[in-house]
């Protein structure tokens, strides 16, 4: 993990996961707590890629939260502070998050990679809850790549996205003479405008 930078948004999510564990009086941080943390909308700093991806997949964050809370029971722990241990499944999910970032040739680990890691882990409560809401690894990856404006691993390898802002993608629908529609995507409105001007020329 040393070669990868966790974004500030991921760091906040990990802190929220500890808070979720403490609120449930658990003496550990599991995949369920990581997922609960990712289901929080940070409206003050803008939408993260993970929540944007779940939104695009039609997943209700509150419904996911309810599913998690039905699967876990409050504990009787008295531990406090930032030193709650991660379960083996949670550690595995974090390792998979780094692996997903590496596979996609991203030099940072964002909430999107953490979400991919949770699903890829497969056996934890986090993965079970996401699967219950129809989230599969292929669909999630496809959605994340679309949000990031890439076609696949290495197509565009951002050096860093510390704010995890979702880039603007402008889609222009072109209708050909035979009635066939073609979708052209551009990274900026200027590029889209230049394309349209070229069509008129």
Image (cartoon, grey):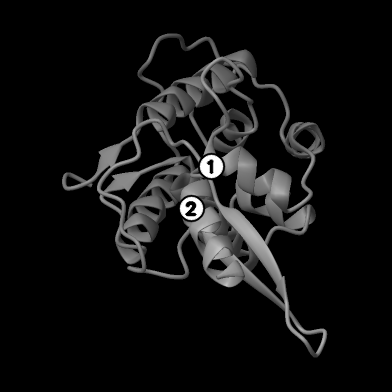
Residue 79, horizontal then vertical, whole percent: 47, 12
Residue 44, horizontal then vertical, whole percent: 56, 14
Q: Residue at 45% x, 9% y: name it.
A: 80
**Disc 1 + disc 2, Cβ < 8 Å:** yes
Residue 137, horizontal then vertical, whole percent: 59, 64
Residue 53, horizontal then vertical, whole percent: 63, 48
Q: Can residue 89 be seen in this view?
A: no
Mark sitting earlier along the chain (1/2): 1
Position of the C terminus, as image quadrant, is bottom right
Disc 2 target residue: 148
Q: Residue at 79% x, 49% y: name it.
A: 58
* The disc label shown at residue 78, or none: none
Label total for image: 2
Residue at the far front: name it.
201
**Label 2's element?**
helix
**Label 1's element?**
helix
Whether residue 143 is situated above or below residue 174 in the rendered picture: above
Q: Looking at the image, which is closer to me, 163 or 97?
A: 163
Q: Nearer the observer, disc 1 or disc 2?
A: 2
Disc 1 target residue: 49
Whether residue 142 is situated above or below residue 49 in the rendered picture: below
Q: Can residue 149 be seen in this view?
A: yes
């Amino acid at each position: 993990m040393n070669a990868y930078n966790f974004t500030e948004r991921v760091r906040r999510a990990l802190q929220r996961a500890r808070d979720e564990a403490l609120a449930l009086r658990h003496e550990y941080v599991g995949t369920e707590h990581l997922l609960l943390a990712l289901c929080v909308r940070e409206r003050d700093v803008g939408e993260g890629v993970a929540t944007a991806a779940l939104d695009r997949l039609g997943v209700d964050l509150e419904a996911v939260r309810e599913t998690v809370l039905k699967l876990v029971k409050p504990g009787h722990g008295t531990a406090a502070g930032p030193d709650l241990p991660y379960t083996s499944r949670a550690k595995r999910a974090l390792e998979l998050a780094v692996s997903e970032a590496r596979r996609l040739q991203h030099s940072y680990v964002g909430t999107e990679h953490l979400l991919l890691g949770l699903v890829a882990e497969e056996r934890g409560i986090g993965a079970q809850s996401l699967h219950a809401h129809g989230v599969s690894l292929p669909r999630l990856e496809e959605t994340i790549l679309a949000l990031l404006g890439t076609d696949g691993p290495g197509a565009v390898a951002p050096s860093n996205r510390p704010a995890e802002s979702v880039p603007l993608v402008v889609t222009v629908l072109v209708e050909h003479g035979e009635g066939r529609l073609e979708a052209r995507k551009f990274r900026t409105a200027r590029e889209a405008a230049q394309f349209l001007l070229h069509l008129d020329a």
